[in-house]
Image (tube, coloured by chain):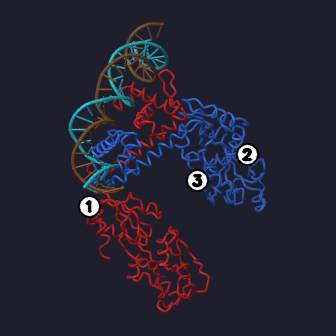
Chain colours: A blue, B red, C cyan, D brown
Amino acid sequence: MLDRIPLEAFRVYDAACRFMNFSRAGRELHITQAAVSRRIQRLEEQLGTKLFTRRGRNLALTPQGERLAQRVRATLEYLEESLEPFRGGGSETISIAASGSVSHLWLAKRLKDFDNGNPSVSVRLLTTDAPSELASEANDLVILYSTGEHLRWNLTPLMKEVLLPVASPDFIDKHRLDPVAISPDEIARLDLIDYERFNAHWISFRQWFARLPTPPKARITPRLSFSTYALAVDAALRGDGVTLGSIGLIADQLASGALMELGSQRLETGYGYHLGMPRYRSLTPGAARLHQHLLSGL
Amino acid sequence: MLDRIPLEAFRVYDAACRFMNFSRAGRELHITQAAVSRRIQRLEEQLGTKLFTRRGRNLALTPQGERLAQRVRATLEYLEESLEPFRGGGSETISIAASGSVSHLWLAKRLKDFDNGNPSVSVRLLTTDAPSELASEANDLVILYSTGEHLRWNLTPLMKEVLLPVASPDFIDKHRLDPVAISPDEIARLDLIDYERFNAHWISFRQWFARLPTPPKARITPRLSFSTYALAVDAALRGDGVTLGSIGLIADQLASGALMELGSQRLETGYGYHLGMPRYRSLTPGAARLHQHLLSGL
DNA sequence: TTATTTGATGATCTGAGATCATGGAGGAGA
DNA sequence: TCTCCTCCATGATCTCAGATCATCAAATAA
């Protein structure tokens, strides 16, 4: 239905509704009162409904008119806001998307470093676990959990996914564990911490055990489950149990000793995190610098 | 900035982005490829930014172009959806707004009765506790918690707010209470159930006690607190404790004996629930019928 | 009562947006 | 490699949706 209505009519309608006065609406829009009257009349014809009631020179909106007015106003405000980035003189803004875990455990501190060295560039981090939002071409850069192939993004590996059970030193002491010699069977009997998987390819604790050379016979039942990977890691850091860590995301915690690997079994999944730049368009200078920054130190 | 850009340009831009082909965009919009080219060029001039990069006959969106495209698409979809009510042949739809408690305890069953007698009218109940949404003129009718005065709504009283402590018969038996003779001091020592107040004028349990002729000296500390009034009433019905009931909203429960009044103290707050019709526009036939229906039986 | 303002409308005007024709560039197919 | 086709850009020209002008009737303000 919208294709048969000139969009400009909604601007006229909006002004008419805001002022409840066609003459003032016309002055606001720099057209005559007669033009406003025509446009409103034409819009009512096209919609098949009266939007205003007229009593002499008094206007009132019909219920449908009122509802449409609110939506039209919201539309114009949204569109006006959408043009903000085109106002002259603003600094460059880069948009990068990453999942919650990557954002929290890996990316945020690197963006901080980038920020310090690039004061004229603003960075907008979109943190989401929705695959479609992650890969949206509205972003300048993305970090995707992938095998390395993507139709619309050129991907560069950041870190392979290597999954290993980890726990805090406190938890290890409390349960008198030998972190080096501990067997998968022993790990399976501990308090396990899992998290939601938004990507069908993500490996749960149960699947991790299942893929071992000699899987434990015990039923794997995690005691705690969190909505995000970062929350699960936080719980492990607190000493609440054993979680499954992705080596690249918890590198700092392993290096500092805040988390310790349990046993010697690691699983390479064939997946990993990749930094993506758009395949069919070039990067802005600031986005190119961020891309370079994130790849350095690997 | 939007006032200097013809809105129709966004429709052309949207089509160009969807097809990434000015010729096809033109065919879709029933204009020539040259017209599309001109409109895009003019839009880029007005925004001061390239939206597309051209390499030979290949188009690609710039990052800003991509972001704008998403917003323009969202805008047009929203506007298209806003016109749904104007499509021919639909039945009449009435919109009524009421708070959660009124919706749940009073209004829902009355709308059901109205529905049964008016099959050609659809009713849309907006349940919200936000005062601005409640009083929005986008609604055909509203039920407002008020003293009876409002600038934009003509209010008719539905029920006065009379607050009284109530509990279930089970709870009363279990605590060997005398519901008639029980004193406020004794009530204050029971398990009290309270709920969130979205309106500054709502009376909490503590305030109810404070306004008694001889307020109890004990500190009022409700054991349970719920996010909605209806949840609090449900808890009282289950026998979880004593809640503060508004007599009009729990009339059915009092009549059936599912809830019983404790003591003889009641507080009239000067507020009440009122049915509002718009002050400055007339009701549709269906809305007028619903208005009449809600006032009947009082 | 008079003056002013507002919305509606018949008659007429007009310029933003459209088309036409053409050129250059790139891709597909033979 | 050549030919044909499709696409985007652009100079010249056209056109009709949207605008104005002038006027009337009705309502409000002074």
Mark 3 belongs to which amino acid?
Glu
Name which residue lies at 60% across and 78% down: B221
* Along the viewing direction, whichever of B125 and A219 lies nearer the viewer: B125
Q: Nearer the observer, disc 1 or disc 2?
A: 1
Residue B284 pos. (x, y %):
28, 59
Mark 1 belongs to which amino acid?
Pro
Few, some or many residues within 10 Å of mark 2 (<14, 14–19, 20+): some
Q: Can residue B134 be seen by looking at this rendering?
A: yes
Q: Chain of mark 2?
A: A
Residue B104, compared with residue B89, is above or below; it is: below
* Along the viewing direction, whichever of A85 and B231 lies nearer the viewer: A85
Residue that mark 1 sits on: B285
Residue A273 pos. (x, y %):
63, 40
Few, some or many residues within 10 Å of mark 1 (<14, 14–19, 20+): few
Q: Is the residue at mark 3 from the same chain as the one at mark 2?
A: yes
* Along the viewing direction, whichever of A278 and B170 lies nearer the viewer: A278
Mark 2 belongs to which amino acid?
Ala
Q: CA distance from mark 3 to mark 2?
A: 21 Å
Residue that mark 2 sits on: A251
Q: Can residue B167 be seen by looking at this rendering?
A: no
Few, some or many residues within 10 Å of mark 3 (<14, 14–19, 20+): few
Q: Secondary structure at mark 1?
A: helix
Q: CA distance from mark 1 to mark 3?
A: 51 Å
Residue that mark 3 sits on: A196
Q: Chain of mark 3?
A: A
Q: Secondary structure at mark 2?
A: helix
Q: Which quadrant holds the C terminus of chain A?
A: top right
* Along the viewing direction, whichever of A17 and B126 lies nearer the viewer: A17
Residue A79, compared with residue B180, is above or below; it is: above
Q: Is residue B103 left or right of residue B45?
A: left
